[in-house]
Image (cartoon, rainbow, N blue to C red):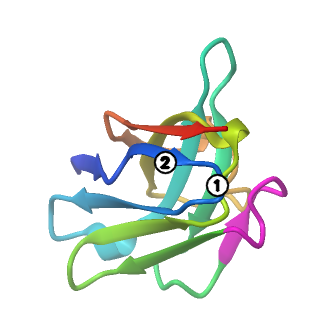
Amino acid sequence: QVQLVESGGGLVQAGGSLRLSCAASGRTFRRYAMGWFRQAPGKEREFVAAISWSGGSIYYADSVKGRFTISRDNAKNTVYLQMNSLKHEDTAVYYCAALTVPSGSYQKPDEYDFWGQGTQVTVSS
């Protein structure tokens, strides 16, 4: 079992930056692949970025490539999402999630076993 707590969300102007953090409990954090997802009002939860347990494999949604960077610090049990050049359409609740048995995709919400409560990101245009 792992508990995930996101932080770092807030209100930012278009073109600005935010850094989200996801702190995980438990000693087995380094065994999990981690992902970030987001959900805007009236829309389905969508994949944003994922990172393998070692950090050696990283994946991004096309909509955030070149603007967002996912990273992890296994010593701190934390995964990060650096978001630059934010756009109004990035407005959503952002969730981090832990994946215990990767099946190769990393992009489907159903693959993930544990979820945080989410943090709101609002980008004003």
Give, as a three-letter code, the residue at label 1.
Leu
Q: Does the magenta stretch include residue 62?
A: yes
Residue lying at 24% horizontally and 72% vertically, measured from the top left: 77
Q: Name the residue under label 1.
A: 86
User: In this rendering, would 96 be left or right of 51?
Assistant: left
Q: Secondary structure under badge 1? A: loop
Is there CB contact under 8 Å for labels 1 and 2?
yes
Query: What number of labels is visible?
Result: 2
Front residue of 53/42: it is 42
User: In this rendering, would 10 be left or right of 55?
Assistant: left
User: In this rendering, would 39 be left or right of 104?
Assistant: left
Give, as a three-letter code, the residue at label 2.
Val
Q: Considering only vertical position in the picture, is 108 above or below 27?
A: above
Q: Considering only vertical position in the picture, is 8 above or below 92?
A: below
- Magenta range is 58-67
Q: Mark 2 points at which residue?
A: 12
Instruction: Name which of mark 1 and mark 2 comes first in the sequence.
Output: 2
Separation (CA) of disc 1 from disc 2: 8 Å
Q: Main secondary structure of the magenta part?
A: loop
Q: In x, y percent, where is residue 109?
A: 60, 38
Q: Secondary structure under badge 2? A: strand
* Residue 1 showing in the rendered view: no
Q: Considering only vertical position in the picture, is 49 above or below 87?
A: below
Q: In x, y percent, where is residue 71?
A: 48, 77
User: In this rendering, would 10 be left or right of 34?
Assistant: left
Residue lying at 61% horizontally and 25% vertically, measured from the top left: 40
Q: In x, y percent, where is residue 92?
A: 55, 33
